[in-house]
Amino acid sequence: MIQIKGQYTFDDFKKARQLHARQGATSYGTRIFLALIGVLFYISLIVLELLGRAGWPVLLAPLALLLVFLLFQYVYKPFMLRRTFKKNKDLSASFEMELSDAGLSVIGPQATTLIPWNNFLKWAEGQEMVLLYKSYSVFQMLPKRLFASQNDLQFLHAQLARNSVPQAGKAAKHISTNRLLVYFFLFIALLAMLFVNIRSIPR
């Protein structure tokens, strides 16, 4: 049996969210969005080359989208992440867990909750964090800094393997049809914006 005691820091929470974002469709969605901006920017450069300096307005659409993406990624998201951590007092409260052959026990002041290993949908591992998924969006954070030794971490790996819990990084990744449609229509909208910019250029 392995015991884990401590409390989460904002750095733990941030690393857990970053690791979660690298799994599933979120990371792929970001790449597709950036690829669409890149394609639009490339088309804009071609138009700029054909029309000369008069074609500079066509660059506004991809540059504006890139600016929005950067503000969202590096200003809005970090702000909301810190706000969520501060508002949720449970995230910064002290906790105690036990890892055993039976599963993961979360020990609270009133009761102890046992989650059998085979109840976890999947797991993910980063350089400093392990996530145990109860569903596709709900996970249990296990910072590696709280493990007493490498043997304790190996015990966790062994239990997950013994109970056939798949690792998220090795699971097949896919994007839902709805998400693909959203990105397709977004691309059409970007092309429409480009077309309007081109039409507005004086001949």
Image (cartoon, rainbow, N blue to C red):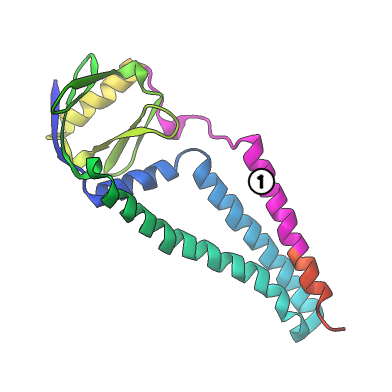
Residue 103 relative to residue 192: left or right? left
* Front residue of this view, candidates 129 and 188: 188
* Front residue of this view, candidates 85 and 130: 85
Residue 30, position as x, y percentages in the image: 54, 51
The residue depicted at 37 percent of the width and 45 percent of the height is 17
| Residue ID for mark 1 | 182
Report the number of discs: 1
Which SS class for mark 1? helix
Reply above or below: 20 against 122: below
Location of the N terminus by quadrant is top left
- Mark 1 residue type: Val
Residue 81, position as x, y percentages in the image: 35, 53
Reply above or below: 9 against 122: below
Location of the C terminus by quadrant is bottom right
* Front residue of this view, candidates 152 and 95: 95
Residue 75 relative to residue 140: left or right? right
Q: Quadrant of residue 64?
A: bottom right
The residue depicted at 29 percent of the width and 44 percent of the height is 127
Reply above or below: 133 against 73: above
The residue depicted at 69 percent of the width and 63 percent of the height is 40
Residue 188, position as x, y percentages in the image: 75, 54
Question: Of all residues shown, which one is farthest toward the right?
Answer: 203
Residue 11, position as x, y percentages in the image: 26, 51
How would you classify the magenta stretch by its main secondary structure? helix
The local crowd at label 1, few if under 14, some if 14 to 19, many if 20 or more residues have their Cα within 10 Å, is: few
The residue depicted at 53 percent of the width and 34 percent of the height is 173
Reply above or below: 67 against 107: below
Q: Determine if the magenta segment contains residue 31.
A: no
Q: Determine if the magenta segment contains residue 173.
A: yes
Residue 137 relative to residue 64: left or right? left
**Extent of the magenta region:** 164-192
Residue 39 relative to residue 199: left or right? left
